[in-house]
Image (spheres, grey):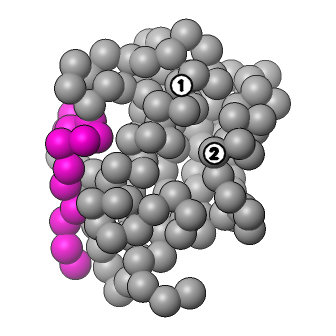
Amino acid sequence: MKQIRTDRAPAPAGAYSQGLLVNGLLFTAGMGPADPVTRELVGRDVEEQTVQVLRNLDEVLRAGGSSLSRVVKVTVHLADLADFAAFDRTYRRLMSEPYPVRTTVGSALAAGMLVEIDCVAAVEGD
């Protein structure tokens, strides 16, 4: 097991890793729409926040030798499930086919946070 860290994504706010590489798979922590430097939330709506979340995830994935195009599993937490259609439009634009398997749930998120995503990505092989 290898810990993955990058200053190009928000630092953990607690006792967890940004990512862990295990047997060719990279598991990420849940990422919110925070700016990696200021830790301030980015985006006024779920679409803007989704862009920042995927940007943060991609930085962790790249630090571990993967990328968004290698993601196989995604878990999405939405503060309001009524935002699903707007989230999905943005997600479809930024992710590539075949889309990863995905679970989307409604969750109580930190104040101002509309979306949080974690994922699992392949690092080597298919």
Q: Quadrant of the N terminus?
A: bottom left
Look at the image and give the residue range highlighted in magenta: 1-14
* Residue at (34, 60) in percent of width and height: 62
Q: Is residue 100 above or below residue 126?
A: above
In front: label 2 or label 1: 2
* Residue at (59, 56) in percent of width and height: 74
Nearer to the camera, 113 or 87: 87
Q: Specify few, some or many for label 1: CA neighbours under 10 Å numbering under 14, 14-19, or 20 or more.
A: many
* Residue at (32, 25) in percent of width and height: 35
Quadrant in the rendering for residue 81: top right
In the rendered image, which residue does mark 2 sit on?
Answer: 94
Quadrant in the rendering for residue 77: top right
Instruction: Tell me residue 52's x, y (percent).
Output: 47, 31
Nearer to the camera, 99 or 19: 99
In the rendered image, which residue does mark 1 sit on?
Answer: 49
Instruction: Tell me residue 44's x, y (percent).
Output: 55, 10
Q: What amino acid does circle 2 point to?
A: Leu
